[in-house]
Amino acid sequence: MFSMRDCIDEIGHLQPSFVDLEKVRKERGIEPMEIFLSTIPDFFDENDCGLLDNICKLQKLIINSSKKEDFESAFEYIQVIRYLLKSFNNETARIAGNSLCLPSFSFFYFKKKHFKRSINCITTLCKQNDGLYYTFPIFHLHKIHHIMNLVDVYIAKKQYEMAGKIMKDIILYHGTGAIPGQWGEGSFEHLNTLRAMISPDHLTNTLFSPLFVSSWRHKQMREILFNDEDFIVRINAALPVESHFYTGLVSFFMAMKSFITAKVTYDISVFFSHFKGFEFDGFKLLLLKEIYVVTQDECVKKDIEMIIKDKLRFKSTDEILQQLCL
């Protein structure tokens, strides 16, 4: 039998793939809306282009102020945006400006615990972005990304089942091209258009970062995501997607399910050996945490700590180690 000790020994001998982290950070620094802003001079006049650029800057100020709980400043920025939205010459440009600012409004309300308003902002965004997609396809990625951000809202409301459902909906959409009607339009055509604009792996990684964060922080989310037999079967059936990251995501789910349900570690070892890129480090950390919490072998625990320090690429290793048993 392939034990936890065998699994950790095998993982300990693996070398992570070389990656130019500076290059990756630059590539990841390209936000979807930067792609949009680079195209607008072909569609809108100077006035409207300037308004859209200012709205993008202001929505970042709203988010930063809300993070600091400086709600007075954040609300002032919101009021400025509302004024700017009345100054557009082109209606499509105005709708685009409104969609650009809605995520920051949603975050403002989220931080103030006005959850219904936060959700309503994203619901409105979904409807508007469906219309914008046909001129600016990048708004579909904008929509899906902020649907995933609703996971945090429902977790804050302790509605873990709804948070899990959103995550499952988007993961399955990425593999099947079918999206539940409540989220508006979506198809393989939408996804393939995005994949022509940005790499499939970059697209997948962008969409699924909330999966790692919510699973790491909340035990309830791990149980909802990884104990669902039907969901595991469905994402496995949806595998033929031209994305190494999606293939790795499916492998991760299979490994997590095997361990949670039967304490089988072989699939974990397979995941580590087949998916060596830094983009899988978050999922590897989740798997190591499951073993760490369950094992009674102090040597295995120590080896896991060394693997996290030496094999995975995180800045705050000490903080991560402190949270292993939380």
Image (cartoon, rainbow, N blue to C red):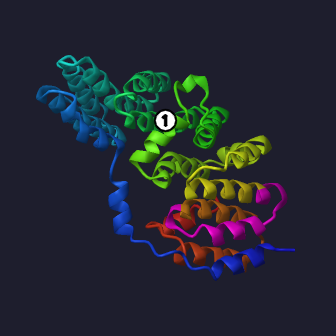
Residue 162: percent from the left, percent from the top?
A: 63, 32
Identify the main secondary structure in magenta: helix
Q: Nearer the viewer, residue 12 or 70?
A: 12
Position of 143 relative to 197 (above/below): above
Quarter holding residue 229:
top right
Relative horizontal placement of residue 226, taking residue 58 as reference (left or right): right
Q: Residue furthest right?
A: 1
Q: Which residue is mark 1?
A: 190
Disc 1 on helix, strand or loop? helix
Range shown magenta? 258-279
Q: Is residue 170 magenta?
A: no
Residue drawn at point x = 12 percent, y = 30 percent: 46
The N terminus lies in quadrant: bottom right
Residue drawn at point x = 57 percent, y = 70 percent: 276
Quarter holding residue 262:
bottom right
For residue 284, say whether it is visible: yes
